[in-house]
Amino acid sequence: MFEFFFKYPWTVYRKGTLVLANPWPLWLLGAGLAAAAAYGLWLFLRKPLPRRRALALAGMEAAVLALLLVFLWQPALSVSMLKPQQNVVSVIVDTSASMALDDRVGQARGVLDGGLLADLRKRFPVRLYQAGRGLERVAQAPASAAQPVTNLGEALRAAAAEAASLPVGAIVLLSDGGDNAGSLGSATMDEVRRTRIPVHTIGFGPERMDRDVELADVQLPARSLPDARLSAVVTLRQAGFEGKTARIAIQDGGKTLAARDVKLPADGVSSREALSFAAGAAGARALQVSVAVLEGERNAKNNALTRLLDVRDRKPRILYFEGEPRWEMKFIRRAAELDKNLDLVSILRTTQNKFYRQGISDPKELEHGFPDSVDELFRYQALIIGNVEAGYFNASQQSMIREFVDRRGGGVLFLGGRAALSDGGWNRSPLAEILPVTLPDRKNTFHRDPATSELTAAGIDSLITRIEEDPTKNSARWKALPYLADYQETGAAKPGAVVLAELNASGRGRFPLLVTQPFGRGRVGLFATGGSWRWQMAQDSRDMSHETFWRQLLRWLAGDVNERVTLASDRQVFSDTALVPLRAEVRDRNYLPATDAVVEAQIMGPSGVAAVVPLLPVKGEPGAYAAEWKAEATGSYLAEAVARQGEDELGRDVFTFRREDGVTENFRTEQNRELLERLSQATGGRYFTPGAAGGLPGEIELSDAGISVKETRDIWSAPAAFLLLAGLKAGAWLLRRRWGAV
Amino acid sequence: MRKPLALLALLSVLAGCVWSFQRGYRGMRRLFPDYEDTGPPADAAEKTEFYFARLRYPNIRASGMWAMRGSWTVDYPKADRQFLQGVRRLTRIQSNSMERIVDLISDDIFNYPWVYVVEPGHWDLPDAQAKKLREFVDRGGFLFTDDFHGTMEWEIFTASLNKSFSDRAIVDIENSDPIFHILYDLDHRVQVPGIVNYPFTRTYEYDGYEPKWRAMRDDKGRIVMGICHNMDQGDAWEWADSPNYPEKYASQAYRTAINYIIYAMTH
């Protein structure tokens, strides 16, 4: 329709520049237009009509005159046109597995073979490609899509690179926009744009999810202690099953570790569900997390994901210093003794000058009391400071405690007590900085009065405070716990700290009870009471809430503490990409960055894959060593980094990762129209639906990307121009008759 | 004629015995006078970490000599308060100056994880109370028994205990056990006599010739019940301030109980 009235398609107007084809001087046109305006004014003044009517008629007459004048100068559009048959058009068909869904690749083939390809070939030499992991030239439009990966960025880069030797006039991409390799970012778009080749896109697939439940993501700790209680955070998306119940489960080699029913969220809305389970015995394992396939689901391949878990057979040691005998210590020790993967070493000041040590590995350990050297303190993974005044520790020991968290990456937990926190002068000690709360600047903050405890929103989600699996029941369980024997007032939590539980002291209000925060490489917690022993003594002996809470708190404190060597990567699952970046952080004996270490990673993978990869120092990052390695085969891998300094081994660490192909193709399978539109917009192309793809050849023609010429297209002769003239003239005549001005 | 004479002789002997006993008792009371309760110590209301809890229990129904002694109130309250002064002076335990009385009827006992039982050789726990005692121990409470002697009192003690602890053995504590070294090293222990043994030429009562430091342990091997048989720590605490009570016994009684308390607070 547009073309009928305006002679050319809208694209010509969009891309063209307005010019005047008649070389007559422009000042003459200006003078003519001024004369037309004067004529209009004369008519206005002369008409014996009310002002408005006179103005309308005079304006129309003047406009007719002005239009005629403009048409004499022959207005036209100057557009760049690709020269016929001299520019190549690259047509790329996405043949990744997601294009097989709903036979999207068949639809693409239908569009191409239904006339688009023939139309293009009439005007341009056409090169046909299929894109999966890379770009592959094909003779015919592909009929199937089975590539395990979509790497659209790589495909476009390769197609654009041909411009160096070929006059590429345009790229046409037929795709659902699923770029699971993540290569089509703004950097790639900029790169393609710089070649000035417009990328036109034709989108396939539904733009919204339809009758499907998708396991969008699973967050799981990468490492754990044996028998640890872990939480998997599962993100679900769905369409068409709102309010229905689905079962989520975690399995290890067919054995179900945890499962529960969840209510599905509203269409298109993501929901997060936590599922806790026991890590089990030591070893590396691949856990399958799934949501059951519901009847009528269109895509059953996006209901499961695999995640790796490295359960390490180690026993972190926790040093607990207690300033005087108290019940809290007994019951903390009892809870810790139930955990065979925790080693609680304690020093108790029984009298003014005598200590009682428990859990020591040899008679020499801690024989002089609290450690006074880095070597001695840093051999522990965590530290509990009980009811002891800050002044008991000398300046060097206080500095070591800070470094224990900051440099060594250990965990420190402060407990409440009559000589603890503000009452023990910790608010004025250098260690106040590492505490997760601001302590009141006064004494008498410790009270031997009852206080009840309650979880905060963060506490409901936390594994530390999870006594009951179900969050609602857990919250209720905390409220129902016996009152604490005592409590200590603290100030507000610091920025970055998380309050997991609050205490309610009748008459004195609410205070943070359990607060955690990261500090440096480590973590710090505060438990503002010495009276949680009542949770044990005032409940049935079979009740395990006290033990469960303390075991979880101690595991949080000591369980994931970095040692001298840590090996990691930017992710654990490498989907559709073989390149695995490895990075090791290496510390020396004093946990200072080791700049002169020799670091190697031994990698073992599926089917006997074995490699030794040297990690080299990273410039500007002392103690950091990195390497990249290609994991060609899919499957699970184990990398062990060993760092040496001279003859001494500083330490070693294990990192497990997984390579998989074609899995992510089954996720987020609806058309990513937004990505395709963004790509076209960024490169000067246009997005088409399959139905509108017939306009593509004309759109491609108007480009200066390849071998092009400038064309001038008259628009003064467009039917719309004559209709406008005629309309103005006829309108003026009709109005004159109506108003009796003839 | 023989019968009346024999009866007269028997009565004379009995009267002589009673007279001698009364004379001895009065003599002993002169040496160890009854405690005049002057009321709670001034700081008894202080809220502290540790409280000395004394168990109130029902006595066994006995007749004759056995009915004359045995009560949860023996040595109360002087022994408790005098012992607590030692705890406060000798350790860093923040303890209250006054004992608390608990029983196995209410749940208040669960607020006091350390409980002292005097003369359990005379207790008679009903089933419900025996069950609560087991629950107290299973939750983490510690029981310290003292001042019962000889075979008969042992049997009475275990009769009530076995109602709820039949699955637990009572064992002798080895010298090397931490409970004897946690604060004081108590390798060389002696029998701590009650004041009835004055002038302490002998230290045992009935057939309780040898002092027995026994214990009941839990599944983890921790001592949950310290059983001091054939000795009387309570008298030693009570009369530690008396020049007539030998210091070595008082000293050991303090040290033993302090060790037991610290053990209870750490295990």
Image: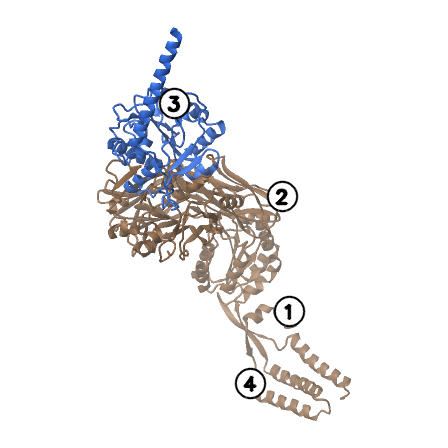
Chain colours: A brown, B blue
Camera sees residue A18: yes
Spatial CA span between label 1 and label 4:
30 Å
Residue B58 in the image: x percent, y percent? 45, 29
Q: Secondary structure at mark 1?
A: helix
Q: Are dots 1 and 3 in contact, CB under 8 Å? A: no
Q: Nearer the viewer, residue A352 or A515?
A: A352
Q: Amino acid at mark 1?
A: Phe
Looking at the rendering, in which quadrant would you find the C terminus of chain A? bottom right
Q: Amino acid at mark 3?
A: Glu
Q: Amino acid at mark 2?
A: Gly
Instruction: Say which residue appears at 66% left-offset and 70% top-offset.
Output: A4
Q: Secondary structure at mark 4?
A: loop
Q: Are dots 3 and 2 in contact, CB under 8 Å? A: no
Which residue does the numbered mark 3 point to in the structure image? B153
Q: Nearer the viewer, residue A664 or A195?
A: A664
Which residue does the numbered mark 4 point to in the structure image? A24
**Dot 4 alpha-carbon crowd within 10 angstroms: few under 14, some 14 to 19, many 20 or more:** few
Spatial CA span between label 3 and label 2:
78 Å
**Mark 3 on the same chain as mark 2:** no
Q: Earlier in the sequence, mark 1 or mark 4?
A: 1
Q: Secondary structure at mark 3?
A: helix
Which residue does the numbered mark 2 point to in the structure image? A296
